[in-house]
Image (tube, rainbow, N blue to C red):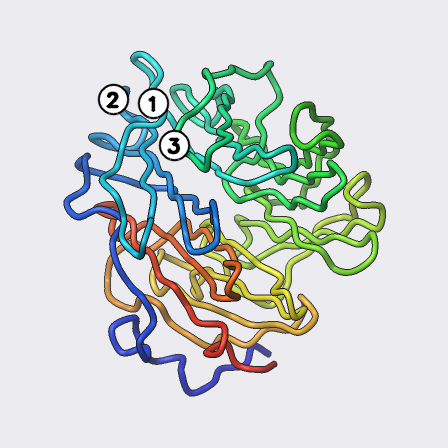
Amino acid sequence: MIKWIALACLGVAAAMGQTSEFVADPMPTVQCHASTVVETAPGELMAAWFGGTGEGQPDVAIWSARRVGGKWLPPVELAREPNVPAWNPVLFRAGGGRLWFYYKFGPSPREWTAARRFSRDGGRTWSAVEHLPAGLYGPIRAKPLVLGGGLIVSGTSVESYRSWAAWIERSTDDGLTWTRHGPMAIPDGGIIQPVVVPMGGKRLRFFARSTVGRVCVSDSNDEGVTWSAPRAIELPNPNAGIDVVRLKDGRFVMVYNHTAKGRTPLNLALSADGERWTMFQALETEAGEYSYPAMVQGSDGNLHITYTWRREKIRHVEWPLGKIPKP
């Protein structure tokens, strides 16, 4: 059974002094969605998202903003493809001094192609856009797991007309090249957008969005080469994106919609083992869409979370490490 504790009924405005702000207000576009966030240097952040007149419209581009000195700088356009929408940016830092930026473009997720750029100065300047070969997508929505020594394990997925399945893309050279592993699928349903976390030793676990009403997981005992059959765990999932972080002290935190239908509320849950969870905070509880969260742990230990706020803005919440309860 999922546990609840006293903080569960508090919303952002009443939640004891943590930072809660929009990355841009007003936004440069009518609609926005699917944010990603990364710490580019101690105390500095970068977020990216897609925005335009509406999801799937040909004017949708990737926008980004940097947070320096505790303030978000004005957003700038990071990628645009001619006459076709862009989708699902992902930012992450790897070895070799690179900050990677991946995104997709195409009429729909069933027809998209992946592209990427990299920066060596924390997102101030970027390489030329590189379009990836067909079938290679990079991280599909959530950040990959960077393990060091050149090894990166990235969750990806394919949304075919009648079938959704998760895949893993694995790099041993800090993201320069990739191999694909999978698929991981469930009977009578679909899973997509997996996020990979370390479980100790060579064991990894991914948590995935699903069409069966609950979060699904799969395990690897060989650093992401092979994976178990996915299974559902106790947490509800309304077919919406999630993110998970394993804290430096070993605890796990998930940001997700604690409901089987709709995209509100948006919640934080805690686990000691990645299996049994305690929902400890509701970030949003009002009517509307609060979805596609991204989360990283900063160098100071605090969590930085970005998410879609009613498709109108991207909200950033900094959650202090000291306000995450013990399991």
Q: Eyeballing the image, is 111 above or below 271? A: above
Q: Between residues 65 and 226, which one lies in front from this camera angle?
A: 65
User: Label 2 neighbourhood size at 10 Å, few (<14), some (14-19), many (20+)?
Assistant: some
Residue 23 to residue 6: above or below: above
Residue 271, percent from left and from top:
62, 72
Amino acid residing under circle 1 = Pro
- Amino acid carrying mark 2 in the image: Asp
> For this view, does 14 lie left or right of residue 104?
left
Instruction: Judge depth for marks 1 and 3 and give the one in front.
Output: 3
CA distance separating discs 1 and 3? 24 Å
Residue behind mark 3: 124
Q: Which residue is mark 2?
A: 59
Q: Quadrant of residue 63?
A: top left
Q: Is residue 166 left or right of residue 36?
A: right
Q: Residue at x 40, y 30 (%)?
A: 87
- Mark closer to the observer (2, 3): 3
Question: In terms of sequence position, does the residue under pointer 1 or pointer 3 come before the other?
Answer: 1
Circles 2 and 3 in contact, beta carbons < 8 Å = no
Residue nearer the viewer, 85 or 1: 85
- Mark 2–mark 1 CB contact (< 8 Å): yes
Residue 77 at x, y percent in the picture: 29, 28
Residue occupied by mark 1:
85
Q: Along the polypeptide, which appears first: circle 2 or circle 1?
A: 2
* Relative horizontal placement of residue 15, taking residue 236 as reference (left or right): left
Q: Circle 3 — which element?
A: loop
In the displayed structure, 147 sits above or below 279; it is above
Residue 58 or residue 79, whichever sits in front: 79
Q: Residues within 10 Å of mark 1 (few under 14, many from 20)?
A: many
Amino acid found under the numbered disc labelled 3: Arg
The image position of residue 260, as x and y in percent, is: 45, 61
Q: Residue 231 or 195: which is nearer the viewer?
A: 195
